[in-house]
Amino acid sequence: MIHDYTPEFDLVWIACLVPNKEEILDRIFQTNPGATVAIRSVDGIHQLLYEPVDATKFSKVTCEEAGGTMADSFIIHSTIYYTFK
């Protein structure tokens, strides 16, 4: 199923467990280049529970990292923000 992320969405979240993140990220920027995309990931020991985001897979997507958050002792996931380049 192909989703349309029309310009009405300023921020689109991609959950940590979603597969094929690079394809989804590419589709978001095809349909809404003005969006900011927040992708959930994990750092440190939490990588035993979830697979971390591999940003090298995003090299085919015209985007750049715009910031992020880190996990701490209370929060398992980190978040990486991307914008269209």
Image: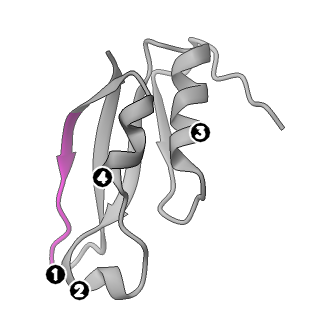
Of the two numbered discs 1 and 4 in the rendering, the one whose residue sits closer to the viewer: 4
Provide residue 25's location: percent of width, then percent of height.
51, 35
In the figure, is residue 20 to the left or right of 61? Answer: right
Q: Which residue is drawn at 33% across and 47% down?
A: 56
Dot 4 amino acid type: Thr
Q: Do the residues labelled 3 and 2 touch (CB within 8 Å)?
A: no
The kind of residue tagged 1 is Ser
The residue pinned by badge 3 equals 23
Q: Mark 4 points at which residue?
A: 79
Q: Name the disc covering residue 20, or none.
A: none
Q: Nearer the viewer, mark 3 or mark 1?
A: 3
Q: Give the range drawn in magenta.
A: 66-73
Q: Describe residue 76's horizontal placement relative to residue 27 as left or right.
A: left
Q: Distance from label 2 to label 1 (Cα)?
A: 11 Å
Q: Residues within 10 Å of mark 1 (few under 14, many from 20)?
A: few
The reply to whether discs 4 and 3 touch (Cβ–Cβ < 8 Å) is no
Please tell me whether mark 2 or mark 1 is closer to you in this view: 2
Q: Badge 4: how crowded within 10 Å, few (<14), some, or many (20+)?
A: many
Q: For the residues marked 1 and 4, what is the alpha-carbon distance in whole angstroms?
A: 15 Å
3 or 1: tag closer to the N-terminus: 3
Of helix, strand and loop, which one carries label 3? helix
Q: Mark 2 or mark 4, which is nearer to you? A: 2
User: Residue 35: x and y, percent?
Assistant: 44, 20
Query: Residue 84 occupies which quadrant of the picture?
Result: top left
Q: Check disc 2 and report its element: helix, strand or loop.
A: helix
Mark toward the start of the polypeptide (4 vs 3): 3
Residue that mark 2 sits on: 45
Instruction: Give the percent coordinates (x, y) of residue 45.
Output: 23, 86
Residue at horizontal 17 percent and vertical 61 percent from the top: 70
Closer to the N terminus: mark 1 or mark 4? Answer: 1
